[in-house]
């Protein structure tokens, strides 16, 4: 019989010996050694060192027929003192819950076939600041002007703040001024673009006051919103140019949007960035989301040339779940979760699981989360527990350890595709001293809610979206630009 492997720890616990006896079911004597990640607190602390570096005018490069854009986490560009740190870590989790409620609300409207009108949605669902959640930014050119925007696979309409602005939040770059652009053109109500707002935003275009202008409205689950007119403009990304790009020219925008100019919608509807640029980039994009470390950058690559990726493992692909009612979302078929080599039954059901760059923490149906929690706690039982916080209720006090070994977590999908969660995506630090380190997965409220893969579990993974072949691929990659 194989000897179980010793897993070395430090300080209080000299070593930890854990194995799972798989012989119970089949009567054999084989024992399976669990798989672990090494997790170092010095790396952990570096995630939260907020040295100020600009998140504006981010770089891009051309490689053969693909354009790669530098992508950064907003926290790596923020002026934050250590006094602010714990507050931000905790607020992000609270606000993330608003983001998930917004997505569930939007999905249920789409499934039911009900469409909101502008008058129905003028009252925000709740108070808060959504763009503390949507963390990743890039820089593009609109009408020849640099615009730094949030990237979000869970949204479709790209928008920026525009002059004259009735209500605008503070942004670092100059607000876009349509009157100085020769290529700017308003979109009228009797157009396919105006009608496409129904799918892209779940709100109908508002045309009652001025039929020559199609007005849009997008509300988010935490109370922030953007409102303005639909228009076309010249879009430049790297050396690629897209004429007559449809976007939202925001005249009234509310929310703490972190000084960026707006948002890029990477969904699948007709108004999304991906669909509008498909003739240039073939409907294919990928990203590698970096950590919050100061100076860390990742990349958003537009185009079909996979040779420009820097992945260290082969890309494994799974098909997108085709649901006509949720056609603008990226839905996948989750088939299981592997925790330290132990398999958990985790089918996402007929609707699938949504992969979203705008949600932080992965959400699972209560039954699947309960099984994940039980297995993780079983394998990590040598460490002292800590109180839960908000949606996170599987927490440990790791402040006495400089280094720990934690179970690996793999999300498994139809077609034998796997997302091997990076070591820094397994725990979320509610407190920066590691006295409250929580499993970075949470339970949904109801079994029939749509499961979501958040961006915290997507770090240091090359994720490829091929809308032409309806595939999503995963490969390990140390994110850099």
Image (cartoon, helix red, strand yellow):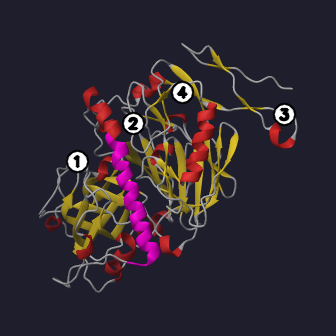
- N-terminal of the pair, mark 3 or mark 1, is 3
Tell us which disc is closer to us: 4 or 1. Answer: 4
Q: In which quarter of the image is the N terminus?
A: top right
Determine crowd level at label 3: few under 14, some 14-19, many 20+ residues with C-alpha closer than 10 A. some
Tell which of 163 and 456 is nearer to you.
456
According to the picture, the residue beneath numbered tag 4 turns out to be 39
* Residue situated in front as seen by the camera: 384 or 291: 384
**Bounds of the magenta span?**
91-114
* Residue 17, placed above or below residue 265: above
Which residue is at 39% across, 34% downward?
A: 430
Disc with the residue nearer the chain's start (3 vs 4): 3
Question: Would you say the residues marked 3 and 1 are in contact, meaning their CB atoms lie under 8 Å apart?
Answer: no
Residue drawn at the location 60% of the way across and 59% of the way down: 348
Residue 369: horizontal and vertical position, in percent?
56, 48
Structural distance between the alpha carbons of marks 3 and 4: 28 Å
**Could you tell me if the residues under marks 1 and 2 are in contact, i.e. CB atoms within 8 Å?**
no
Question: Mark 3 vs mark 2: which is more N-terminal?
Answer: 3
Q: Mark 1 points at which residue?
A: 259
Q: What element carries label 2?
A: loop
Q: How far from the left and from the top, in percent, is residue 340? A: 66, 36
Secondary element type, mark 3:
loop
Q: Which of marks 4 and 2 is in front?
A: 4
Identify the residue under disc 2: 292
Q: Which mark is residue 59?
A: none
- Label 3 vs label 1, nearer the camera: 3
The residue positioned 65% from the left and 46% from the top of the image is 314
* Vertical placement of residue 16 versus 256, above or below: above
**Mark closest to the chain's N terminus, 1 or 2:** 1
Quarter containing the C terminus = top left
- Image coords of residue 469 (percent x, y): 60, 66
């Amino acid at each position: 019989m194989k000897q179980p492997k010793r897993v070395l720890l430090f300080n209080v616990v000299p070593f930890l010996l854990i194995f799972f006896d798989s012989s119970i079911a089949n009567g054999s004597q084989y024992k399976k050694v669990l798989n672990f990640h090494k997790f170092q607190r010095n790396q952990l602390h570096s995630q939260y060192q907020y040295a100020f570096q600009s998140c504006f005018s981010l770089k891009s490069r051309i490689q053969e027929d693909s354009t790669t854009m530098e992508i950064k986490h907003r926290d790596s560009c923020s002026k934050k003192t250590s006094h602010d740190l714990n507050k931000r870590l905790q607020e992000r989790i609270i606000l993330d819950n608003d983001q998930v409620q917004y997505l569930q609300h939007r999905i249920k409207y789409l499934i039911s076939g009900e469409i909101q009108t502008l008058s129905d949605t003028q009252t925000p669902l709740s108070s808060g600041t959504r763009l503390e959640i949507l963390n990743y930014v890039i820089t593009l050119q609109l009408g020849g002007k640099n615009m730094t925007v949030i990237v979000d696979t869970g949204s479709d309409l790209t928008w920026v703040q525009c002059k004259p602005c009735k209500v605008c939040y503070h942004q670092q770059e100059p607000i876009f001024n349509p009157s100085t652009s020769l290529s700017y053109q308003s979109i009228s109500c009797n157009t396919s673009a105006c009608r496409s707002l129904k799918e892209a935003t779940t709100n109908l275009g508002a045309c009652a006051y001025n039929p020559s202008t199609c007005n849009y409205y997008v509300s988010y689950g935490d109370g922030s919103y953007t409102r303005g007119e639909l228009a076309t403009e010249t879009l430049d990304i790297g050396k690629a140019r897209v004429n007559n790009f449809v976007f939202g020219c925001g005249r009234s925008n509310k929310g703490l949007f972190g000084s960026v100019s707006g948002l890029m919608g990477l969904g699948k509807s007709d108004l999304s960035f991906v669909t509008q640029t498909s003739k240039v980039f073939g409907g294919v994009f990928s990203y590698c989301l970096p950590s919050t470390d100061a100076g860390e950058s990742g990349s958003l690559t537009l185009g079909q040339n996979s040779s420009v990726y820097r992945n260290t493992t082969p890309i494994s692909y799974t098909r997108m779940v085709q649901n006509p009612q949720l056609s603008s979302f990226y839905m996948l078929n989750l088939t299981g979760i592997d925790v330290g080599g132990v398999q958990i039954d985790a089918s996402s059901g007929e609707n699938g699981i949504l992969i979203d760059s705008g949600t932080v923490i992965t959400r699972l149906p209560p039954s699947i989360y309960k099984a994940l929690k039980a297995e993780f706690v079983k394998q990590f039982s040598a460490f002292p527990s800590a109180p839960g916080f908000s949606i996170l209720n599987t927490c440990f006090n790791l402040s006495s350890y400089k280094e720990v070994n934690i179970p690996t977590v793999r999300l498994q999908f139809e077609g034998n595709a796997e997302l091997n969660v990076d070591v820094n995506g397994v725990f979320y630090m509610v407190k920066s001293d590691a006295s409250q380190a929580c499993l970075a997965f949470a339970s949904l409220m109801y079994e029939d809610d749509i499961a979501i893969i958040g961006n915290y579990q997507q770090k240091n993974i090359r994720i490829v979206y091929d809308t032409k072949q309806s595939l999503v691929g995963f490969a390990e990659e140390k994110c850099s630009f």
